[in-house]
Image: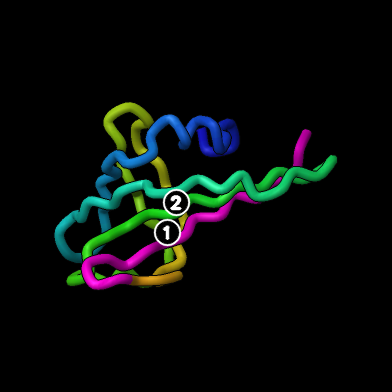
Amino acid sequence: MLKNLTATDFSEHLDTKFRLFRQEGLPIDLILTEVDDGFDQKELEQFILIFRGPKDDLLGQGSYTVKHPRMGSLDLFMIPTISSDQSSYYYQVCFCRLVQ
């Protein structure tokens, strides 16, 4: 399913909750705060998602299952703490794939 998703698919769900599940610990809610179209080249498509999570629960880099009420279940590779503020950590998910 991930291979068919586009930046537009995620943009429709900005500022909504995605529940993240991990092997250890309770699930946490992340908010999709940004969708960056990145750049498109003739053979390459790229876009970036930015999620905001709670400051009291820092996630490590890795693959996580996230569920959204309308998008369903997705396995995403997240990079932690691209930035933070007083109440949140931010995470990045990059999509980069060859265009068929």
- Up the image or down, 67 lies above or below 59; here it is above
Left or right: 32 with respect to 77?
A: left
Q: Quadrant of the C terminus?
A: top right
On residue 63, the disc is: 1
Q: Is residue 30 above or below residue 86?
A: above
Neighbor class of circle 2 (other Cα within 10 Å; few <14, some 14-19, many 20+) is: some
Q: Which amino acid type is shown beneath numbered disc 2? A: Leu
The secondary structure making up most of the magenta span is strand
Are discs 1 and 2 less than 8 Å apart at CB?
A: yes
Label 2, on which residue?
Answer: 76
Q: Residue at x 47, y 60 (%)?
A: 92
Q: Is residue 6 above or below residue 98?
A: above
Membership of 92 in magenta stretch? yes
Location of residue 36 in the rendering, given as x and y in whole percent from the top left corner: 56, 48
Q: Secondary structure at mark 1?
A: strand
Indicate left or right for 48 with 52 as reference: right
Quarter-of-image position of residue 15: top left
Q: Nearer the viewer, residue 93 or 36?
A: 36
Q: Is 29 contained in the magenta span?
A: no
Label 2 sits on a secondary structure element that is strand
Residue 56: x %, y % from top left: 18, 71
**Residue that sits furthest to the right in the current view:** 42
Which stretch appears magenta?
Answer: 85-100
Measured as percent of width and height from the top left, residue 6 is found at 57, 35
Three-letter code, disc 1: Ser
Which label belongs to residue 97?
none
Q: Is residue 36 above or below residue 61?
A: above
Image coords of residue 9 (percent x, y): 50, 31
Query: What residue do we see at 65% from left, 50% from top?
Result: 38
Q: Earlier in the sequence, mark 1 or mark 2?
A: 1
